[in-house]
Image (cartoon, helix red, strand yellow):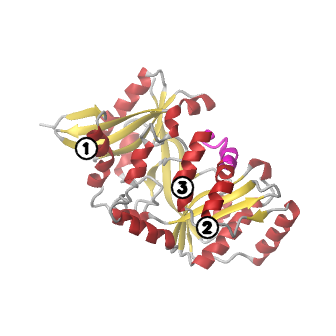
Amino acid sequence: MKEQITIREVTTKKEFNRFFEFPYTLFRNDKNWVPQLLSGEKSTFDPNKNPAFEHCKAKMFLAYKGNKIVGRVAGIINPRVNEAWNQKRIRFGWFDFINDKEVARQLLKAVEDWGKQEGLTEITGPQGFCNMDRAGMMIEGFDEETPGGCYYNPEYYPKILEALGYEKEVDTVQYKMFGSQPVPEKVLRINDLIKEKYKLKMVEGISKKEMMERYGVKFFEALNRTYTGLFGFVPLTEHQIHYYIKQYFPFLHLKLACFIVDENDDIVGFGISMPSLSKALKKNKGKLLPFGWIHFLKALKNCDKIDLYLTGVAPEWQNKGIHSLYHAEMNKNYIELGVKTAITNPQLENNEAHWVWQKYDSEIVIRRRVFVKILF
């Protein structure tokens, strides 16, 4: 007799903790899984810490067979995104499950049913509260070590989702680049002309504290303008901006944070990279205490492998060659730091910026998919 599956909404602190601990059981023998920082994961679902809850609603569900947890999922409703994109959608994320189609079906049904109760007509995911959260289910690249800021999943996930009637909405790709590739002299000469013509300069020679104070807000304001119009993006609120400044700026590596500013000291282009934290997260099992922070600090100083997080040019400065400035500057710093490999954050498959990566010794190593399904 097949064991019955039970879906329960997370309502207690114990269930809350078990929700985030479940992947450690599911992936304990999977060498490519990278745990997330547990404290950060829990903060994301804490209404007292995450400003997204000022406009979002969320529910968390666990799937059980007997007393054993066999899956989890979060449902998220973001009215700002729905209004901006003229949609009636609920999102699913933090979706993990054993290789059992019925477990996945019942977990997603819990989210679907909540969406229907709220009058929503579609479900999409995996996505988070906003574009600063992880998104996209892996459909290729399962042999690649997952960057710390991205979802990991086994091959059976997308197959089961498709069997449940979920369809592709959009794919993203991640490139891997090899070695500290030199910047062509021609590019350097052209970049000097661009900087002189538009009176631009690189931010350098300042402390991390000064960078955060002078450019933290300006960076996210530039990001808001740059990413408006991209798939599902809604500008971060002022409260969210300050939340992410505190969350990310203290960990910046100054040689891997490239800000280009104009004569008014406003950011016109940016490129943010970080040393890969994947191995550190594996060693400390997603925990900073009691000694996990040691692995974390070591990783922040080791630039053999880096992750490229965010790049962009403010819309009023596009088509002026600004992208070439930050790519060349980052490239020079990679050479100085002895970078061996770099992997990009997920980028939309139709993003015009792909031609930049294709000029390097690079290859697409991971492809991800955001799925959508009509509810009624």
- Which numbered tag is attached to residue 70? 1
Q: Does the magenta stretch include residue 103?
A: no
Q: What crowding class fits label 2: few (fewer than 14 Cα within 10 Å), some (14-19), or many (20 or more)?
A: some
Q: Where is residue 328 in the image (x, y as percent from the top left)?
A: 70, 69
Query: Is residue 274 visible from the viewing direction of this image?
Result: yes
As shown in the figure, which amino acid type bears the numbered disc 1?
Val
* Rendering quarter of residue 342: bottom right
What SS does tag 2 mark? helix
- Which numbered tag is attached to residue 248? 3
Q: Position of residue 168 (x, y in %)?
A: 50, 42
Considering only order in the chain, which callout, 1 or 3, is on the residue closer to the N terminus?
A: 1
- Which numbered tag is attached to residue 254? 2
Considering only order in the chain, which callout, 2 or 1, is on the residue closer to the N terminus?
A: 1
169 vs 64, nearest the viewer: 64
What SS does tag 3 mark? helix
Q: What residue do we see at 77% from left, 56% from top?
A: 265
As shown in the figure, which amino acid type bears the numbered disc 2?
Leu
